[in-house]
Image (cartoon, helix red, strand yellow):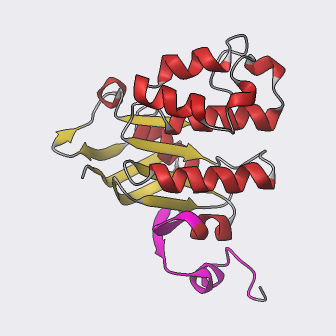
Amino acid sequence: MSILHIDSLTKSYRSKKILQDIYLRCETGKIIGVLGRIGEGKTTLLQIIFGTIKADFQFIKLNNEILTKQSDRKNKIAYLSQQPMFPKNIKVRKLISLFCDSKNTEKLYSLNLVQPFLDKSLRNLSGGETKLMEVLIIIYSKAEFILLEQPYSGLSPIFTEKLKKIIKEISKEKGFIISDFNAQQAIDISDKIYLLSDSHLKPIKDLKELQQYYYLPKNI
């Protein structure tokens, strides 16, 4: 089992505190869900963990290795952002072989979800199809920990349910931190849920607690 440990993480923009004293622990075999409204800092949190943004203060450790530079995360932590990630003119088959090891390349090639798109470039796919291919390539990549920013956004309900099953299966070997707006979706798949609110990360047990924090209406 590997452990990704985030402690005392703090980040401000100008005079506004975005993240304060964030503690988060993710193990391989677990899915962590992070809920929060727009502007609460979910993207910033994931980007700091991935190493593309610097925090004011942070302590991030993978097993016994302290991670200080983005290069420290190579092939250890992978991140899916909301922005398009891959060149549009490269075929899906080639992208898979570039980002995945031989074992996972063959697994992706054999997936019914992927086979119709293997010999198409991303520019010839719909927005939802492109998003699905990006998510799958990231979660089947060489990395042991996967950070996903709203992975179901833009997907059809059928793609969403199939992707959730794949994430659950892959999580037997990897650790996931997934940001989302949809509370029920996050609760369905996650082993532990947090709410990012007022710059703090708060552990959540159930929907009732989300109502107490005014994240959900009390009449649902």
Q: Is residue 197 visible?
A: no
Locate the C terminus and report the quarter of the image it occupies. bottom right
- What span is in magenta? 189-218
Vertical position of residue 210 compared to residue 112: above or below: below
Question: Which quarter of the figure has residue 72?
Answer: top left
x and y percentages locating residue 138 in the rendered image: 53, 34
Q: Residue furthest left?
A: 64
For residue 66, side relative to residue 172 (left or right): left
Vertical position of residue 87 compared to residue 145: above or below: above
Residue 197 colored magenta?
yes
Which residue shows up at 46% across the image and 48% down it? Answer: 170
For residue 26, side relative to residue 162 (left or right): left
* Viewer-proximal residue among 86 and 39: 86
Which residue shows up at 60% across the image and 64% down it? Answer: 186
* Viewer-proximal residue among 75 and 81: 75
* Viewer-proximal residue among 172 and 56: 172
Which residue shows up at 55% across the image and 23% down it? Answer: 96
